[in-house]
Amino acid sequence: MKSLTFGLDYDDTFTADPDLWRQFIATAQARGHSVVCVTARRTPPDFSREPRMPDSVPIVCTGGQPYKKHAAAKAGFAVNVWIDDMPGLIEPSLVLDFGL
């Protein structure tokens, strides 16, 4: 099995159902995968008043960079699978029209 790195958004993704994502993170890590939280925030969430991400998950803040993929790479993470409610923030993309 190939080891994967999952990029998980925080706001409106992790926070939409923290218990579900904590279970996902535990299962992914138990299977040898990595999970990194990549958020468009400038600073990490305040876990004293916001849903806590597991301590085993590193947090990357874009700090004003336009795309999460660039911020993750700069922090040393090559994300294979992205989980994000706003995928347009991951990397530049084109809308393809296949005439469907």
Image: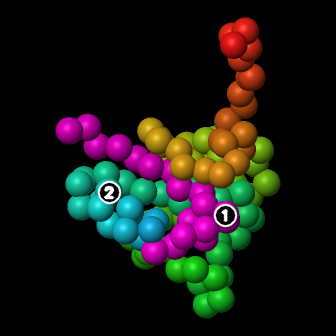
Q: Residue at x 36, y 54 (%)?
A: 34
**Residue receiving disc 2:** 28
Q: Is residue 33 left or right of residue 76?
A: left
Q: Quadrant of the N terminus?
A: top left
Q: Is residue 72 left or right of residue 39?
A: left
Asked if the magenta segment contains residue 12, the reply would be yes
Disc 2 to disc 1, how far (Cα)? Answer: 20 Å
Q: Is residue 24 above or below residue 74?
A: below
Q: Which mark, residue 12?
A: 1
Q: In x, y percent, where is residue 93?
A: 71, 27
Q: Is residue 57 left or right of residue 2?
A: right
The answer to whether residue 74 of the structure is visible from this angle is no
Q: Which residue reaches farthest top?
A: 99
Q: Residue at x 48, y 57 (%)?
A: 36
Picture quadrant where residue 35 is located:
bottom left
Q: In x, y percent, where is residue 50?
A: 63, 82
Hey, what amino acid is under mark 1?
Answer: Asp
For the record, the magenta segment spans: 1-19
Q: Quadrant of the C terminus?
A: top right
Q: How is this picture coloured?
A: rainbow
Q: Residues within 10 Å of mark 1 (few under 14, many from 20)?
A: few
